[in-house]
Image: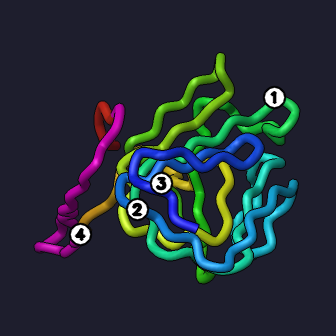
């Protein structure tokens, strides 16, 4: 089956809109409340599973959920998670969370293998990503030098 660029494939409360033609070969798509692949512990009770990995997908994925599926996860923290058959990957960029419409839409995905799809809270412990960290002693003084990137709402460091 081929889904042309810009067309929509919908299964229950998930939709895919490819930005390039997307071919699904001999693949079954199902909807359940639990994941099959290990590694993701706190996710909503709505999981979409392909029978095997798809061809690379580029485009937009949207997921609609009910409040009863949240499993005590704050709606503003929901992120798209995709398992590619090997591990779970968080897609935190290009998200639109709409708590009134109970949707998370993630756009600008590029060449992603789809195996399982769900929503979960961000696994990032801090609102930044660490770069290099160096520490050295000079006499009786300890020097620490670090860099970060993708900082969000950071005021200062202690």
Q: Identify the residue shown where x is 38% and y is 42%.
A: 94
Q: CA distance from mark 3 to mark 2?
A: 21 Å
Q: Main secondary structure of the magenta part?
A: strand
| First to last magenta residue range | 134-153
Q: Identify the residue shown where x is 76% and y is 56%.
A: 47
Q: Is residue 152 magenta?
A: yes
Q: Which residue is mark 2?
A: 21
Q: Nearer the viewer, residue 28 or 98?
A: 28
Q: Residue 75 location in percent, x, y?
A: 66, 31
Q: Is residue 120 above or below residue 3?
A: above
Q: Which residue is mark 3?
A: 91
Element assignment for label 2: loop
Q: CA distance from mark 4 to mark 1?
A: 40 Å
Q: Nearer the viewer, mark 2 or mark 4?
A: 2
Element assignment for label 1: helix
Q: Nearer the viewer, residue 25 or 89?
A: 25
Q: Residues within 10 Å of mark 3 (few under 14, many from 20)?
A: some
Element assignment for label 3: strand
């Amino acid at each position: 089956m081929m889904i042309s660029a810009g067309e929509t494939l919908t299964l229950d409360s998930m939709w895919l809109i490819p930005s390039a033609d997307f071919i699904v070969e001999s693949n079954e798509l199902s909807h359940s409340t639990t994941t099959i692949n290990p590694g993701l512990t706190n996710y909503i009770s709505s999981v979409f599973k392909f029978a095997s990995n798809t061809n690379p997908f580029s485009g937009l994925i949207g997921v609609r959920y009910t409040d009863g599926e949240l499993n005590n996860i704050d709606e503003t923290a929901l992120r798209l998670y995709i398992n590619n058959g090997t591990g779970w990957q968080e897609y935190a960029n290009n998200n639109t969370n709409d708590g009134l419409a109970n949707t998370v839409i993630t756009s600008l995905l590029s060449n992603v293998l789809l195996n399982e799809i769900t929503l979960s809270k961000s696994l990032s412990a801090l609102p930044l990503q660490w770069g290099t960290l160096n520490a050295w002693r000079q006499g009786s003084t300890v020097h620490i030098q670090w860099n970060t990137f993708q900082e969000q709402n950071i005021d200062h460091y202690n």
